[in-house]
Image: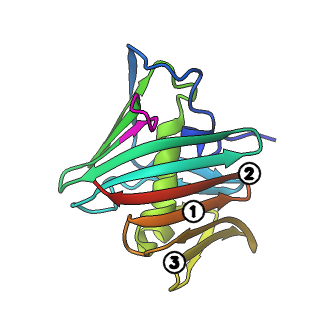
Amino acid sequence: MRLSVPACAFAVSLLTSCAAAPHATPGTITPGAAIPIANGVQLVLPAAQPFGPGLQVVQLVRARSKTRDQTLQAIIESDASQLTIIITLPSGPRLASIIWRPGDIETTLASNVADKGLSPHLLADLMTIYAPAPILAASLRGGTCTESTGGTRVISTGGVTVITLFRQHPGTWQGAASLTNLSYGYHLDISGQPL
């Protein structure tokens, strides 16, 4: 059995220490990459960020698994040419940055970030929660997504629910959101507000 990195790797196994790191590791992700988001389900990152321009939001993200409980802050902004995500501890030290431009996703991780595969999984979680339903459905491989008008999405494979999520205000990044990955055993609680 092949073990894959849980999609919440950005929060659950992020740090080896809490100190700010003096050096960063740059990297890239190729749009079109298939990211495992649950057993038997992958999400293909589109060539361009699917969220559109005009995002200016700050989020507190609490990630919980059986062995970890971690809170991080994400600052997310977008314009017509790119999506920018800055991940910090709530107290401020920068842990990672991601810039998603058409055809290119650039990442920079602080040297104290334990999981060098966090960026694609972070983007996959954001798409699972916030991408418009038609884009999410077209990006899934091995799974299907159903969405209710009340802000609930369910991703399943073979008739088995593997991911559930809820957004307090569907169509916006503000307010509360939660994601439970039953396949990989983690839960995200997100609180977003305008930047």
Residue carrying label 2: 185
> Which of marks 3 and 1 precedes in the sequence?
3
Q: Percent x, y for residue 12?
A: 62, 39
Q: Is residue 176 left or right of residue 77?
A: right
Disc 2 marks which amino acid? Gly
Name the amino acid type tagged 3.
Answer: Gly
In the picture, measured across the screen, residue 3 lies left or right of residue 125, that is right
Q: Specify whether residue 194 is in view.
A: yes
Query: Of the residues shown, which amino acid type is indicated by label 1?
Result: Ser
Residue 101: x and y in percent read: 26, 46
Q: Residues within 10 Å of mark 3 (few under 14, many from 20)?
A: some
Farthest front residue in view: 91
Determine which residue is flagged by label 1.
Answer: 178
Q: Position of residue 120 (x, y in %)?
A: 48, 43
Q: Around disc 1, counting alpha carbons within 10 Å, would you say few (fewer than 14), some (14 to 19), or many (20 or more)? A: some
* Residue designated by label 3: 151
Quadrant location of the N terminus in the rendered image: top right
Residue closer to the observer: 3 or 52:
52
